[in-house]
Image (cartoon, helix red, strand yellow):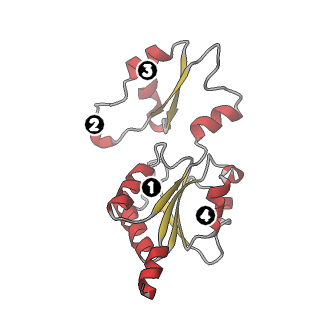
Amino acid sequence: MSARAKHQNRGKVFLVGAGPGAFDLITIRGADALSRADVVIYDHLVSPELIRLAAPTAELIYAGKKGGAGKGIEQSELNAMLIERARMGQVVIRLKGGDPFIFGRGGEEAEALARANVRFEVVPGVTSAIAGPAFAGIPLTHREHGSFVAFVTGHEDESKGAHSTVPWDELVAAARGRGTIVILMATARMRATLDR
């Protein structure tokens, strides 16, 4: 095997959940991956203290993603960047707030990496959907009061227009006295969401 092929084989992307904000809520696996990174591409919600866990030599790239406000790197550009850097033989950390697969576009990034035959690993993170209520002393499930929990976006893709794919009527009816609905990213559209 050539030296170039060996270098390319080293390339890998880690889709890492940074947790709900507090730097000490990242998983041990996530912190370990971060410490070995050549490149860290991170979102707005990631704690600045967490970035300090990256290797001193790591290149840090801010991706933006500030709750719909301001422009960050477009998703297609991010996907291309992950693929390109891994093919250069780099260990790339895509550091995302919460969990990469809970409304974090981690699924889209994983699909792009799989299509490009780039090695990747998903490192789950603690989502704010669980951490927020837990810190507030609110159990999402309870043997006597709630048998299920549903995570719902309060900020659907604008390309869907006025046609929400969230079955609000069914969710609200099912949750009454029997379950919990956790609505994420709902601030900008709170009134419309609560009026359902």
- The nearer-to-camera label among 4 and 2 is 4
Residue found at the far bottom of this picture: 3
Residue position for label 1: 70
Could you tell me which quadrant the C terminus lies in? top left
Marks 4/2 in contact by CB < 8 Å: the verdict is: no
| 183 to the left or right of 21 | left
Residue position for label 4: 33
* Mark found first going from the N terminus, 1 or 2: 1
Report crowding for label 3: few under 14, some 14 to 19, many 20 or more residues within 10 A (C-alpha).
some
Q: Nearer the viewer, residue 180 or 163?
A: 180
Residue 37 lies in what quarter of the image? Answer: bottom right
Q: CA distance from mark 1 to mark 2?
A: 21 Å
Residue position for label 3: 171
Of the numbered discs in the image, which one, if any, rests on residue 103?
A: none
Residue position for label 2: 161
Residue 136 lies in what quarter of the image? Answer: top right
- The nearer-to-camera label among 2 and 3 is 3
Report crowding for label 1: few under 14, some 14 to 19, many 20 or more residues within 10 A (C-alpha).
few
Amino acid on which the number 1 mark rests in the picture: Gly
